[in-house]
Each structure stands twice: as C-alpha cells, then as structure tokens.
Image (spheres, rainbow, N blue to C red):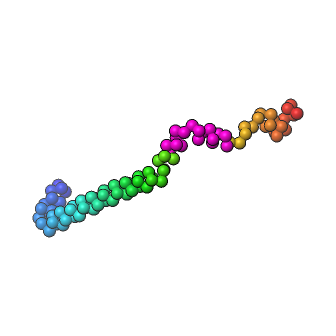
Amino acid sequence: MLILIISSMISLSPELEQEMGDFRTMSDQIDSILVEKRELFGNNLRRARRQSGYYQQVLNTYTAPSLAVEQADNRPPSIKPSDVDIKCGNIDSL
C-alpha cells in the first residue's frame, strides 16, 4: 500500500523525476572520479615502493636465511639453569 502511494507521488511529479535523474548522473560521475583517483593513487604508491626498494626489503626479510642467522647471533646468551639456581638462593647448588 505504501509503495503504491510513493510510486503514484513520484509518477505525478516530473520535476522530482528530473531531479532524481540529475542526482544519479552526478553520483555516477563522482563514482567514476573516485575510481580513477583510487587507481592513480594505487599506481603511484606501488611505483614509489618499487623505486625505494620496499618490495625487495620485504622479500629479503621473508626469504633470506642469512638475515635470520644474523638476528639469532644478536640475541643475548642463553641462561643456564645453574645461574638461575644460584641467583634464587638454592642451597643445593652451592
């Protein structure tokens, strides 16, 4: 029932139909501009990352085993159980 009333109101108002058509046209134009700008931004971002070596750094991080070895060498020395016992005051280890 409500749909019939609304549709009859719209069909009675050609001015409203014209405004809705203008709105749809404007909305489509805005959408196309946004898509164009998004693609341009994405292309520029990818180009900048490629030129700066960003992708190569990411690739090296995940594929280079030498990097993992270097990071492992920089860790502090492991703690021995005997060190923990002495620091905690374990009488049996003295």
Residue 46 x %, y %: 41, 52
The residues colored magenta run 58-74
Does any portion of residue 24 appear in the rendered image? Answer: yes
Pick the residue in front: 77 or 17.
77
The part of the image, by quadrant, that contains residue 86 is: top right
| Quadrant holding the C terminus | top right
Does any portion of residue 20 appear in the rendered image? Answer: no
| Quadrant holding the N terminus | bottom left
The residue at 77%/33% (across/down) is 81
Residue 71 x %, y %: 63, 42
Left or right side of 87 for 24: left
Residue 21 x %, y %: 17, 63
Note whether 66 is above or below 57 in the view shown: above
Is residue 36 in the magenta section? no
The residue at 14%/68% (across/down) is 15
Main SS of the magenta part reads helix
Is residue 65 in the magenta section? yes
The residue at 27%/58% (across/down) is 32
Note whether 82 is above or below 39 in the view shown: above
Pick the residue in front: 69 or 90.
69
Pick the residue in front: 54 or 9.
54
